[in-house]
Amino acid sequence: EAQVTQNPRYLITVTGKKLTVTCSQNMNHEYMSWYRQDPGLGLRQIYYSMNVEVTDKGDVPEGYKVSRKEKRNFPLILESPSPNQTSLYFCASSDLTNTEAFFGQGTRLTVV
Amino acid sequence: AQRVTQPEKLLSVFKGAPVELKCNYSYSGSPELFWYVQYSRQRLQLLLRHISRESIKGFTADLNKGETSFHLKKPFAQEEDSAMYYCALQIYNQGGKLIFGQGTELSVKP
């Protein structure tokens, strides 16, 4: 089954403790991205990648890092999480024609 | 500036009533617009895109460049249509980035 898989689904952590949210897709898509969803703001892009070793900032990249060492994986790294990064995070992938983006199930992160 | 606006946070209708979810965009280029839907406890999924001119689950959306709108319509709402709906604009010169509206929650009552 074609899908995008994120882990974990839920995470509660403390300020400053590094964490990684994984994202994997099995559709051989070139394009992957991370979004955060906040009430009243919709989804905002954090980072995106057009292929292996090619990443770029989205609209709200501060406090986040990503890597794209393999085509299928695009982890989101929070080196020193802060409470304002409490949010619902979505990973998405698509091919370069971008006719449709496929989304993961979401990761609900709480930073206390 | 590139922007997508969905003016209604919540839209509540009765089963069988017509429904229209509004979407306006701001973009200097030729727009590629989409509607994504998120049912309860499920991931976002594509509902329809303007370029395909399809009707999916009875929903249609017409791009009106003069009014910069891409409203989603259905003549007779069903309870299973209750979900969160997002309008999205694709930016090709930024790697196909999607800019989302704030979302509209549609509630269809029996």
Image (spheres, rainbow, N blue to C red):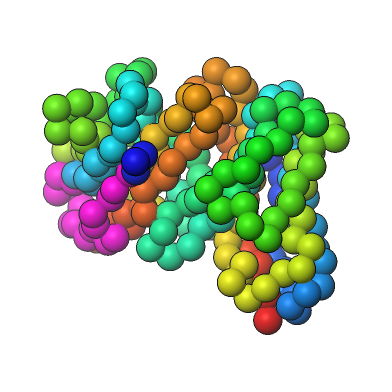
- Residue at x 73% of width, y 26% of height: A51
User: Quarter holding the N terminus of chain B?
Assistant: top left
| Left or right of A50 in this view: B108 | left
Please report the bounds of the magenta region as a residue range. B4-19
Residue A59 placement, left or right of A81: left
Q: Residue at x 32, y 33 (%)?
A: B27
Residue B49, picture quadrant: top left
Residue furthest to the right = A69
Q: Position of residue A3 (x, y in %)?
A: 67, 36
In the picture provided, is B5 more to the left or to the right than A69? Answer: left
- Pick whichever, B25 or A95, lies toward us: B25
Residue B94, percent from left and from top? 53, 30
Residue A1 in sight here: no
Residue A13 location, quadrant:
bottom right
| Total labels drawn | 0
Q: Residue at x 60, y 49 (%)?
A: A46
Q: Answer above or below: position of B105 versus A96.
A: below
Work out whether A54 lies above or below A45: above
Picture layout, residue B101 above or below residue B66: below
Q: Residue at x 27, y 61 (%)?
A: B10
Image height of A18 relative to A100, above or below: below
What percent of the width, then of the height, locates residue B43?
55, 48
As rendered, which of A49 and B8 lies closer to the eye?
Answer: A49
Q: In the depicted view, which residue is nearer to us: A26 or A69?
A: A69
Residue B23 is covered by the magenta coloring? no
